[in-house]
Amino acid sequence: MAAQFGRRLRKGVTTTAVAAAAVAALAASQAPGATTDGQGGQTTSDATPSSEEAADAGATGNSPYYTDLPPLNSPNPAPSASTGTDTSGVTEAGIPATVLDAYKRAEATLREKKPGCNLPWELLAAIGKVESGQARGGRVDADGTTLSPILGPQLDGNGFALIKDTDNGAYDGNSSYDQAVGPMQFIPSTWEWAGRDGNGDGREDPNNIYDAALAAGHYLCRNGWDLSDQRDLDRAILSYNQSTEYLNTVMSWLEYYRRGTHEIPDGTGTLPRDRSDSTGTVRPSPTAPSTPPSTSPSPKPSPKPEKPADSGTPNTPPPTTTPPTTPPTTPPTPTDTVDHLENAGTAQFTAMAGDAFTERMSARAETDAGKAVAKVRIRFTVISDTDTTFTGGESVATVVTDSSGVAVAPALQAGEKTGSVIVQATVVGRTVKGVAYRATVTERAADTLVRTSTKELTCTPGGEFADAVELKATYKGAVADKVAATATLIKSAEDPTENDKGPYFKDADGKAVRTLSGLPTDADGLLKLPQLYADDTEGTFLLRVTTPGGATVTIELTVAAPPTETEPPAETENPAETENPAPSDSPSDSPSASPTT
């Protein structure tokens, strides 16, 4: 394929010598077969064609694009009735809800998959603007698929690039020549390797804004480009369409959207007028693909009939009537029928900091008669100042309603910030009554505290305790980590106020303190208290440790002087152990000596 594209003659009327030189430089810098660099570079799953093919064909085959420039005024002006401030910037800055959602979702995916690319969703919006006018003003269904195909002119070399058919008409319906397809205008040969499934339906459809936006993001993030670097940004945009005019137009819209934008209902976006193929004013129908104007000659009027020879009255042709043309009507989408949202789930949502909420929020889309509406996109947005997010770390989740009209949001994951969390559910593409949910994040808690040792804790007056106090915290039998405990040396079991004598801790300045708060348990639920010291007061003292959730343990501490040493009693002699016993005065009991004979 690379060689085939390399031999094609580009005839795009907007391609300039400057653009050609820029693209040539790009081609030289794009090494095929790149591997991941660990910073969001290309991976084997993002295989791209050779640099020759990528530089020659681009994403769009250099198809025509819309050249309308953004208004000069700010996208967020403060209109004044008295001064008559122009509000066209507000109109131009609006992006259809589903299209905007697709761009932001693609940015979030690329932020995770290729963080080194630094893709801004505003770049996708800028390209979507010049390629298709944001999918013809947001004419898409609830799944993001355009209501009718968006096709560029056939690339037959007649004023455009010459790209013969590569997909047997699978994407563009043209088995002779390729045509750019979908809201991001991919040519079939590029979509074949760049296509992505952006909405999770198992298909890679260039006519789906979610698929097309994600594909465009991956396309712009290939070759290890960092789009926060202006040089790489220029390279990426030029690789999409090889024209400096195209680059300048996209950059104009990129900067415009960076200054501000807002969501508008699907199907109400402003359609562009001017196109780069010099066909004059072009405003494609929102329900039919854009096609070049017909060049067929107009039919000549029929010659006036001759007057019959035998008639004395002129032969007047019967009046002709032209049937009135009725503009095609577009059937309402499911989204168009939604009147309001209802809360379809549990009203109470509570979780401990760091835990997942067990209950999930759900909303039901209904008509004004209360009938459920299926296949409607519901956006759940965390709108309060919190670090609580949906599973995956996102603060926005978009879900399509099921056959019963219900959309169930992903589970919320509580952050460390406690208090109320507000989540707003709205209909994507419609401004109707939504639903607000309130969730509560409570502080981490423990319901049990136990010492990990049974050894008595003793100390001499003025000394320090040799053994540390270590505790383990659990909650409902599970390890309770990051729980903030409070340790206080109290006066008695009946009087939990702080003692003013006996054992104590030390603060950072070495001063005695008898209460410490905010002592966190570790990942295993263990809490090792700081070193304990004793003043000169002897006696038995109490240390009480408490946690949120009601866990309490009271520990005895003993401060006592060491026992005094006493002299051992004097030793007495044992007569039986006398070395020289006195001679006995009694007659010897030994037998008498035998007389000498």
Image (spheres, rainbow, N blue to C red):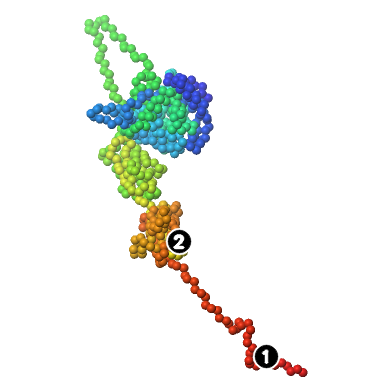
- Disc 2 element: loop
The residue under the point 52% across, 26% down is 28
Mark seen at residue 464: 2
Query: Label 1: few (<14), some or many (≥20) within 10 Å?
Result: few
Pick the quarter of the image with the C terminus. bottom right
Nearer to me, 474 or 411? 474
Residue 516 coordinates in the image, percent (x, y): 39, 56
The residue under the point 52% across, 30% down is 32
Query: What residue is disc 1 on?
Result: 590
- Disc 1 element: loop
Residue 69: image quadrant is: top left
Does 531 sit above or below residue 137? below
Amino acid bearing label 2: Glu
Amino acid bearing label 1: Ser
Nearer to me, 297 or 138? 138
Q: If you read the primary sequence from the N terminus, does the residue marked by circle 2 or circle 1 appear first?
A: 2
**Distance from label 2 to label 1 (Cα)?**
72 Å
Residue 257: image quadrant is: top left
